[in-house]
Image (cartoon, helix red, strand yellow):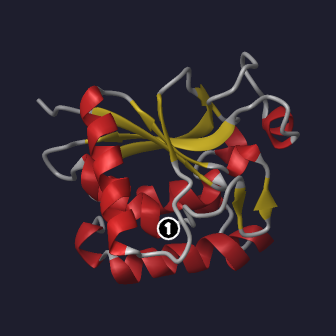
Amino acid sequence: MKNIELATFAGGCFWCLEAVFDDIKGVEDVVSGYMGGQMLNPSYEAVCGGATGHAEVVQLAFDPAVISYKQLLMVFFAIHDPTTLNRQGNDAGTQYRSTIFTHTPEQVAVAHESIAYLTNEKIWNDALVTEVVGAETFYPAEDHHQDFFKRNPHQGYCMAIVSPKLSKFRKNFTTLLKS
């Protein structure tokens, strides 16, 4: 029987994150949603309005025997800009913040170790602003947001933002791709 764990990341638009993590072997499921706010059962419109405090997130169910949490974190840091506060590209607001929502004490430790490593390696010119906070209630996004890129590859945002990000990921992480 598989030992499935959860990982939850916020790093900009969940459509981008979902498309990438969906391509990784060992990731069993990816669900776009919201976490880290005050409103119960938030909607996309409410979260985009910025008043709920939620971030757009993806929650992954993954098999740690196939892919480690640390490897997932390295992908996470590679596919978004962890140095911009509450912004990814043209998407601005607290809902687009860079956050690692941890589910276990081990995830807390690995997240902090990964941030320290990336900081020491000076991968970016600016300091990392990624938060590490305990996971809160996860609210799945509306059905039309799930598998958005797969269902809408020719939509404008997908062509301009998601597709190039996915291509870059596939080029740089070939060993992690599902066959």
Residue 177 horizontal/vertical position (percent): 30, 68
Pinpoint residue 31: horizontal percent, then vertical percent. 52, 40
Q: Residue at x 17, y 51 (%)?
A: 66
* For residue 70, above or below residue 101: below
Which image quarter: residue 119?
A: bottom left
Left or right of residue 1: residue 111: right
Residue 81 makes an appearance in the image: yes
Work out whether residue 4 or residue 130 is closer to the camera in this orientation and state it.
Answer: 130
Residue at x-position 70% and y-position 35%: 142
Q: Identify residue type, mark 1.
A: Ile
Tell me the quadrant of the picture where the N terminus can be found.
top left
Decide if residue 5 is on the left or right side of residue 124: left
Q: Residue at x 86, y 38 (%)?
A: 45
Q: Residues within 10 Å of mark 1 (few under 14, many from 20)?
A: some
Relative side of 54 to 65, left or right: right
* Nearest to the observer: residue 53 or residue 118: 118
SS type, badge 1: loop
